Image (cartoon, rainbow, N blue to C red):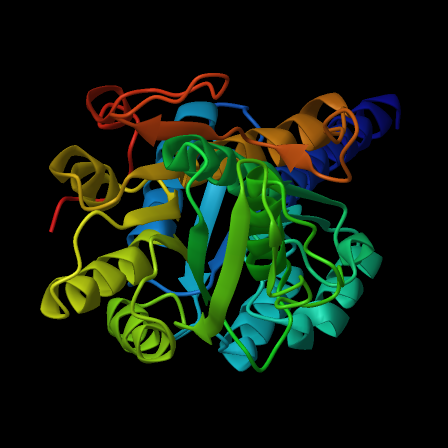
Amino acid sequence: MESMAIGQTVRMSRKWATAAVVTCALLLVACGGSSGGSTKVGVALILKNFTNPFFVSMQNDAKAEAAKVGVSLTVSAGTKDGDVATQITSIENAVSAGYKGILITPNGPGVNDAIKKARAAGLYVIALDTPPDPPSTVDITFATDNLQAGVLIGKWAAAQLAGKKATIAMLDLFNNQIVSVDLNRDHGFLQGMGINPGDTKKNGGEASTGQYSGGAYQVVCHEPTQGAEDGGRTAMETCLSKASNINVVYTINEPAAAGAYKALQAAGKTGVLIVSVDGGCAGVDNVRKGIIGATSQQYPGRMAKLGVDAINDLVLKGTKPAVSAGLDFYSTGVQLITDKPASGVDSATSAQGATTCWGTIS
């Protein structure tokens, strides 16, 4: 009887040991663990689209960082700007897969409810580049300080005018919806010029005439471009039909700036100051060529890299990212790029900007 008890005990111990091994294995799978004993954190990167070089840069740097730190990363995107439905599906898939976090460039407020459900399910959600409305929809946003980006190009333009009258064309993103990036860049440019943007909730709220920091100004137009080259060209043509003596052109981004330049060129206009925001390789090359006078460079790859690290650190170390001082988001930096430096405005050359740009030269 004693020997049978010992045998039963051994057999039961083996069963317990086997059960423990199976349980541990299941736990490792659930946590994303590997056979090497490391824990892989699941993260979903959800972009606006796969065509814009800005978002391609985000994807590439996020993948590289995920491979470096051992994060399991999936990447998806909308079919185009504004495609909310595809992004919602991607958010729901991330929740179903048991991921720990989401990095998203929101295509609009239509994704807000899905983000809220993901957070309620325990996922940490970081917005990249585009803060949602309201910003509290996500846990934190990693983005360019778009207001500061606008201020830099506004200050540069004012300095280049050296007291001459500023006849300004404003080539914005939209005219049928309010987007924070659009507002902040537009208003920052005006503030940099020394012009009160007026109504903080919309573009075009400034007085159409008045005094900028160097002299008199006139804002001729606010035209939408959709952030595209053809939109920039059409918008510039419309503005020139209203005033032929435009000498300053603000553009929401570098594709719009390229389109504006083509319209000016076709109209035989030279010596017009074109300023923009982006810092992509094609845009920086246009600074080198003199097509764009100055651009504020932003860093999409840095946003994605820091986002991957933030979620990984939160899961493995329990540390949460914090917003930048004085802001309600984490600023990923901005640098003015120009080959015509202005006194009192910190800048880097196009050659320097080419070492930190994103995308390829078209």
Q: Is residue 113 left or right of residue 174?
A: right
Say which of 19 and 332 sits in front.
Answer: 332
Q: Is residue 127 left or right of residue 306?
A: right
- At a point 78% along the width and 35% down the height, the residue shown is 12
Quarter placement of the N terminus: top right
Let me know if residue 236 appears in the view.
Answer: yes
Q: Is residue 172 left or right of residue 21?
A: left
Q: Quadrant of residue 263?
A: bottom left
Residue 30 locus on image (x, y percent): 64, 46
- Residue 97 drawn above or below residue 37: below
Residue 179 locus on image (x, y percent): 62, 65
Say which of 151 and 109 sits in front.
Answer: 151
Q: Is residue 165 left or right of residue 23?
A: left
Let me know if residue 128 appears in the view.
Answer: no
| Count of numbered badges drawn on the protein | 0
- At a point 47% along the width and 25% down the height, the residue shown is 69
- At a point 54% along the width and 71% down the height, the residue shown is 87
Residue 228 locus on image (x, y percent): 31, 68
- At a point 36% along the width and 50% down the height, the residue shown is 54
Residue 289 locus on image (x, y percent): 12, 38
Say which of 74 and 297 sits in front.
Answer: 297
- Residue 350 drawn above or below residue 121: above
